[in-house]
Image (cartoon, grey):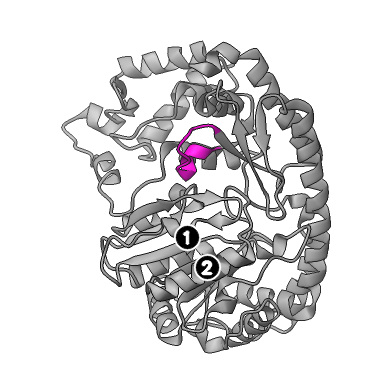
Amino acid sequence: MKKPKYQIIIDFIKEKISKGEWAIGSQIPSQRHLAKMFGVNRSTIITALEELMADGLIEGIAGKGTVVTNNTWTLMGNHFSTNWNRNVTQGIHKPSVSTVQEINEAESDNRFIQLSKGELSPELFPLKEMQEIIQKVSNQLTPFGYEEPKGNRKLRQTISSYLKERGVRVSPPSILVVSGALQALHLISIGLLKEKSTVFLEEPSYLYSLSVFQSAGMDLDGLPMDNKGVKVDSIFQTKETGRNILYTIPTFHNPTGILMEESRREELMEYCIREQIPVIEDDVYRDLWMDNVPPEPLKARDRHGNVLYIGSLSKTLSPGLRIGWIVGPESVIDRLADLKMQLDYGSSTLSQLTAEMWLSSGMYEHHLENVRKQLRIRRKKAIDTLDKYLGFYATWDIPEGGFFIWIKINYSFKVKKLFEKALSKGIVINPGSIYKEQTGQFIRLSYGFASLDEIEKGIFELSEIIKNNKVELKY
């Protein structure tokens, strides 16, 4: 006899609890999430939860949702279980804000229209070429173990040549291979900065959606921007020399897409050198230009070792490779290499060999030509659709590169409500609040991942949400 749906849900939750996967003190998924998971309405979920509450397994707690209060062992006798929920809140590293966690979860669900993802669509993944390169790597493979602390020597030499073409002259000993740009930021935060240092950064900024620097005990100080980049005259040192650093994304900024102009780059470098403020330049979007080659990196102007330069293949080729790099003075790279060895003993050898062959074979540059062509098509689709459906409700600038359109929604509507409504309709967007945008009227829309049809459908649905929920979105 087929079990009723509410009983299937009860059995599922009991199994999770009995295995310790949902430990005592854990918050169980929301009713909305469970309803979507099992394809039922919320009344079925409520029936199941009420029975579990009657059994003494879960309890609704104000401000915390529904949490596990017992398991089968504690109910059977005088047994005590560790309440891991207490430990979850005591770790040194801060959790992501709840909205970011919600976005991360939705981005792993391929049923959603992903207008949030900052990565290339699977449609643009060079599968045939990747298979060819991996086959070549496999054919040339010899027994391998841990790489050098700074990374595979041949890859670092190839990165040196690659950067020279982009204006950055650096030798392999000044390059550290890392597992993506995020690891680079983590290494810098724990290895180079004093506690209570100040990190200057653009506001809004991608860094606000991360907790990497705050968890290391740093203060974030936002700097205003205009359409030329960060406003240099807004930087004020509030602490002694050695307790300030600037983090910037000058080329196709995340989330705004702004390209810092040449004169602003010169002004920024002059100021930071004069005031002895070291710079972290995040340049992972550089190769995604569509209209014109962008100005040279800040690092190309650096004659004093003042700039730590971060690059990556995650945005242009594949995030799955987990290959990026940091460029800086040798003493700094030595320090960060030692830290990386302590953390993971080096990035994957296979990934490093694959990345080296991509960069040295000429296939990477050929791939970039196709990516730029396809991004132009996607950008045009997004802009044309925005003009058609959202022109009355929002404004935006056309980006010259990268994935993102920074959209200002009419003040009549609250973006947080729009985000929630869109998510309930299967559309993921990034509200500006996760980047510490102060007005609460911006969203970041990505045209890099979703298909052309999904871009049009997603933007159309956003306009319909605004049209049909005007009263609700205002309050």
In space, the residues marked 2 and 1 are separated at their CA atoms by 7 Å
Q: Locate residue 4 relative to residue 126 in the image: left or right.
A: left
Q: Name which residue type carries label 1.
A: Val
Return the residue nearer the eye: 284 or 267: 267
Q: Which residue type carries mark 2? A: Glu
Asked where in the image residue 29 lies, by quadrant, the reply is top left
Dot 2 crowding, Cα within 10 Å, few <14, some 14–19, many 20+: few
Assess disc 1: are there few (<14), some (14-19) or many (≥20) residues with their C-alpha within 10 Å of its C-alpha.
Answer: some
Q: Give 420 or 206, whichever is nearer the viewer.
A: 206
Q: Are marks 2 and 1 in contact (CB under 8 Å)?
A: yes
The residue tagged 1 is 232
Quarter containing the N terminus: top right
Residue that mark 2 sits on:
267
Residue placed furthest toward the left = 78
User: Residue 194: horizontal and vertical position, in percent?
Assistant: 28, 68
Determine whether 191 is above or below 284 in the image. below
The kind of secondary structure element at disc 2 is helix
> From where the camera sits, is residue 210 visible?
no
Q: Quadrant of residue 109?
A: top right
Tell me which segment is drawn in magenta: 431-441
